Image: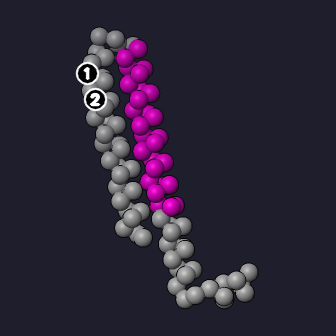
Amino acid sequence: MLHVLAAQNPGELQAGLKTVGAGIVYGGAAIGPGIGIGLVVGNAITAMARQPEAAGMVRTTMFLGIAFTEALALFGFVLTFLLK
């Protein structure tokens, strides 16, 4: 394995590790919002099933929660490109 690393051009390993790190950062940044959106939608469906007359207000609040949670995923996406 060491002979393969020794045959590389200077800086080539560092560029590859940066790319791997960027993928890990975005993967980690996507896990949290994915779980958050699942919880928001699941609880909204439960609330609408229990109180159908409040469905409009619950739906509006659900979409706001989804938008704020999705903003976290976008921050992770931007951070991925900043690391590269």
Asked whether 84 falls inside the magenta stretch, the response is no
At x 47% / y 41%, what residue is drawn?
A: 35
The quadrant where residue 52 appears: top left
Q: Position of residue 47 (x, y in %)?
A: 38, 19
Above or below residue 83? Residue 65 is above
Q: Secondary structure at mark 2?
A: helix
Asked whether 37 falls inside the magenta stretch, the response is yes
- Identified by mark 2, the residue type is Thr
Q: Which residues are magenta?
A: 23-49
Above or below residue 34? Residue 57 is above
Q: Are marks 1 and 2 in contact (CB under 8 Å)?
A: yes
At x 45% / y 50%, what residue is drawn?
A: 30
Residue 10 as seen in the image, left or right of residue 59: right
The quadrant where residue 55 appears: top left
From the image, tell me which residue sits under label 1: 57
Of 66 and 84, the residue lying toward us: 84
From the image, tell me which residue sits under label 2: 61
Q: Position of residue 67 (x, y in %)?
A: 31, 39
Residue 39 as seen in the image, left or right of residue 51: right
Which class describes the residues within 10 Å of circle 2: few (<14), some (14-19), or many (20+)?
A: some
Above or below residue 36? Residue 58 is above
Of 15 and 42, the residue lying toward us: 15
Question: Which residue, as the protein is rendered here, is positioned at the far top?
Answer: 53
- Give the quarter of the figure containing the C terminus: bottom left
Which class describes the residues within 10 Å of circle 1: few (<14), some (14-19), or many (20+)?
A: few
At x 50% / y 61%, what residue is drawn?
A: 23
Residue 77 as seen in the image, left or right of residue 8: left
Task: Report the magenta stretch's main SS.
Answer: helix
Q: Secondary structure at mark 1?
A: helix
Of 43 and 83, the residue lying toward us: 83
At x 41% / y 14%, what residue is drawn?
A: 49
- Identified by mark 1, the residue type is Met
